[in-house]
Structure formats: structure tokens, C-alpha cells
Amino acid sequence: MKKTPRNTSLPAFALAFSLLAADGVQAGWIKSYGTKGVEYGTTLAPSPKGGYYLSAISSPATSTTKSAALLSLLSNQGKPIWTKKITTGAYDTFYLSELNNGRILLQGTTAVNDGPADAVWAVYNVNRATGALSPVFKKAYKGKGDEQLIITQDSQGVLWGTGTTTSFSSNGRSMDMVLAKIDANTGIPAWSKVYNYGYDDSIVAFIPKGDNFILLADSQTATADSKKILLGQLNKLGVPVSGSFKEYGGTGLRISALNIKPISGGNYLVSGNLENSLNDKYPRLFVMKLNSNLGYVWAKSYAGGSDQGLHTAEVNENADKSLTLTTRLDTALYINIGGQQFPFGALAHPTVIQLSSNGAVISTKSFEYKEVDSSRLSRIANGDYLLGGFTSDAMDPNKPAEPQVDMLYGRFNPTLAPAWVKTLAGPLLDSGFISQKSTGYLLSGETMSWGAGNVDVLAGDLDANGDVPGCPYIKEVAMAETAPTITATNLNWQPKAASLIRKGSITAADIVLNVTNGAITTTNICSN
């Protein structure tokens, strides 16, 4: 007898497809997602197959509850189709993202007693209709100390892990660098290296250069009052290229690298922070230029005025070979008590420093809306800049009530003139950032103004003007422009030959991860 074919998954597929397709016209929305606890670490990314993946960490509402990773597939209008929770049952800090092949990558750390953590990485196949996650692999590095790995995927689909370990140090506290090439189908490192140079070493960037890779790292002494930069090349197996590694920095300074990026002529720019000591309240920035062979060309530091610090630098080269350095300028506030001045806070504003091709200051701009505009400017593909962060009045020591904090975001043209700047203003505390997509912007952030718990995550789909039409909480604002005084100083660094010490390799072990249905409350903030 001929049997009638059965397809038990058809209703689920049909339901999921209808949820994605029914609201295919993306008219704009902003929502909060959360539980009764605290949600943070928001990532919102469009999926090539439709909808969005929302990832967050759900932290306990009580001390007896452990954190867990939440993953939701959202429809085009932000409605959760399903939500999954992933945890070991211990103290977990996990992040999730979609890989090039549609699989889900989980990474982070787990700790049994809220102490030293093990690094965790796992890959899942996902049934988009039901949210069922089937593991491809689940791995951890269970060292003797504290282990951290950051996993990224390259254009060839290879997973790279960079991080730190204390398992190889004699005192069990100082950090060594970890580099691993991880098979995306097994989770097992094809190779891994543990390297040491100073007391505490950490990898800042790992980028391709021809057939090799550039490794940029920070290294500090045991006293923590001296910190320098390491820069050199590794081959395809992670072995240092002979004679390539150099140490950069000055005696008695803390030099922390933030990034390295290629520019015209095969040259490179390295940017970062410079401090006089661990407790320096007024850090400076530095920019260093290297030639195509990673040879030193010049390095300069940039400082604000009296009681001012510069933070979170990003440097970009322009078409005319000039440079744009974006940062945040903080100015200390003081209160007079008994005739003595005591610091109690700081003013903060996004700031732009235009530099010549050799690092000389050409001009400066600082943008001010309220007293505290704690936000940053980041360049996008066409040369424009996006602004993101938060804004508020400064804390008044005579009126200790917490000020209202609003999300501050906007778009600036390549000459750093605002195209538009807006706030998302709820009654309490809100902050976040925007990223560009094909027809507008995605919003990711955190809110205490709306939602189910203490802190919920914010997510949204904005139009080309950064709006959800008709949203009463979005206001267009104007930022005043000032010209702060920024001073450049030649650093005259003398690169010193450096040799990495190979200490060993890491091994992957299987780990148990629990995947369950998650409960998440959605609050509609704005919808057109």
C-alpha cells in the first residue's frame, strides 16, 4: 500500500515564513527586550535569510541566579519568532552571532565559582522555523588559570581565536598571549600558540599582510606603571618571522594600542592611549605611522588643555593623505569644599582632530549638545561618520539626584559636519549606537525607561534619516561646535628588537551546554 508522505515540520516552517513575510515592508520600529533581570551586550544583525538575530546576556535578578545567553530570531518588524537560552549553569558570559554559512557561533567564558574562567566556543546548526539548535561542536579550554578567547571568522570561513591565558605563568596571575587557528567543523585548533614577552601580554589586533599576519599586542611590567607595544609578523602557522618584532614606547609611560590599519602606499597607522601612570586622570592619544615593511616613520602624542583627557581614538586616512583622528575629550569638574578643589565628574564631548600626513594638528572640532555627550564617531564605508552613545546634564553635587540620560546618535559627512543628530529620550537612562544597513540603520543599546526589568536591551530599525516616523521619543537636536586646543608632541620612539617566548599550546575539551526555550518580554517603544 502506498503511504501518504508526511512532513511534520511544514506547519512550523509555514508559521515562521508567514511571520517573516507578513511584515516584509520595513516601516521602522524600536523595541525593548528583556526579563525581570538585567540584559546587556546587545547585538542586532540582519540575517541573509530574512529577519534579524538579536543576542544579549541575561544577568540575574537575584544572587542565586546565573547569567545566560539569549538568542532570538526577530521578524522584519522586530517580533520574536523564538528565543533560546544557552548556559552551563555556572557563571557564563556568552555572545552569539551568525556565521557566513548560516550557523550560529557561541563564544565567551564560564566560571564555576565566579573566579578564573574557561574559554568556550561552540557552533550550532539552526532550524529557523523552530529555533532548534543542533551542535556541530562544543569546546572549551580548561586551563589552570583564567582563560579568554575572542573568536572571529575570516573570508575563507576559518575561525581565529586570540586571547589570554594565565595557565603558563609561574605565579598563576600574569597573562600570556594565545593565538589559535580553529577548524570551523570540529572546533579543534589546527594549531595554537602561547607567547610571552613581559609580565602581562594581550593581543590587540591580528590582521593579514600578504602571506603573513601582523600581530599588535600590549605588554606591561609587573608594577603596571610601564606598558609598551609589541608589533611584528607571524607566518601561516603562527611562528614569528625572524627579526620582525619590535617594542615601541618610552620609559615610565603606559602605552596602550587600540588598533592598526593599512593606508595608502602599503603603510600602516597605529593608534592608542598614552598615560603617565596607572592612575593618570588625563590620558593622551598617540598615532604612529609605519612603512610597508613595518618600519618606524613617525609617532606623535596629542594632549588637551589643563585637566583634559582624550579617549577612544580612531584614526583614518583621507583622499588627500591627511588624517582624521576622532576621540572623546573629557574636562574635569571640581567642587570647592573648605577652600580645596575636589574632582566629582567630567564634561565629555565627541571631538575631531584633523592632522597633516605627518601628524601635525591642522584643526580641531568638538561637538556639544549637553554637558556630558559621552559618544564616539566612527567612519563608515563612504567616508561619512556615525555618532553613538549617550547625553545628559552633568551631575550636580548640590543636587545628587541622578540626571536623565538619553541615547545620542547621528550622521556626519566626511568633513565632519553634522547631517543630522538625534536623541532617543525616555524618562530614565537610555544609550546605544547605530550601524548602517542597505536602507537605513540598525539601533542597538540598553534602556531603563521601557521594558520588563531593571535594564533591557534596545533594538530598532530606523529609516535613512535615523527616524521611526511619528515616534514621540526621537528628537532632532543641534550640537554646537567649538575648537578645543590640542597640542601635538613628537614622541621620537626608538624601536627596540623584541623576541616572543613560546610557552606551549592550548587543547580543546568537550563541554556541556544546555539549550532551552527562553522567555523574553517585548515592549513596543515606537512603530510606524
Image (spheres, rainbow, N blue to C red):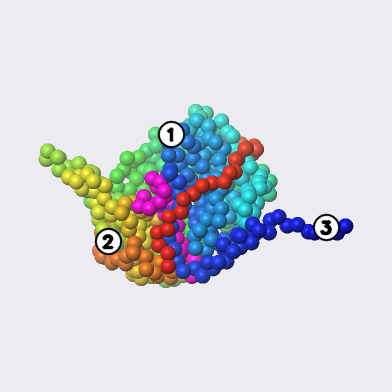
Between 340 and 171, the one nearer to me in the picture: 340
Which residue sits at x=86%, y=59%? 2
Residue under numbered circle 2: 369
Q: Position of residue 98 (x, y in %)?
A: 58, 55
Residue 79 highlighted magenta (yes or no): no
Q: Earlier in the sequence, mark 2 or mark 3?
A: 3
Residue located beneath label 3 in the image: 3
Q: Residue at x 58, y 33 (%)?
A: 143
Looking at the rendering, the stretch of residues picked out in magenta corresponds to 433-462
Q: Secondary structure at mark 2?
A: loop
Dot 1 alpha-carbon crowd within 10 angstroms: few under 14, some 14 to 19, many 20 or more: few
For the point 52% across and 39% down, which residue is it? 92
Viewer-nearest residue: 496 or 284: 284
Kind of residue at badge 1: Ser
Quadrant of the frame with the N terminus: bottom right
Quadrant in the rendering for residue 149: top right
Identity of the residue furthest to the right in this view: 1
Q: Left of 315 or right of it: where is 18?
A: right
Q: Secondary structure at mark 3?
A: loop
How many angstroms separate mark 2 from mark 3 (CA)?
Answer: 71 Å
Q: Comparing marks 2 and 3, which lies closer to the viewer? A: 3
State the image coordinates of residue 404 (x, y, percent, origin top left). Answer: 28, 52
Amino acid under disc 3: Lys
Identify the residue at the far front of this view: 1
Is 335 placed above or below 286 here?
above
Residue drawn at 35 percent across, 40 percent down: 278
Between the residue at mark 2 and the residue at mark 1, the CA separation in whole angstroms equals: 39 Å
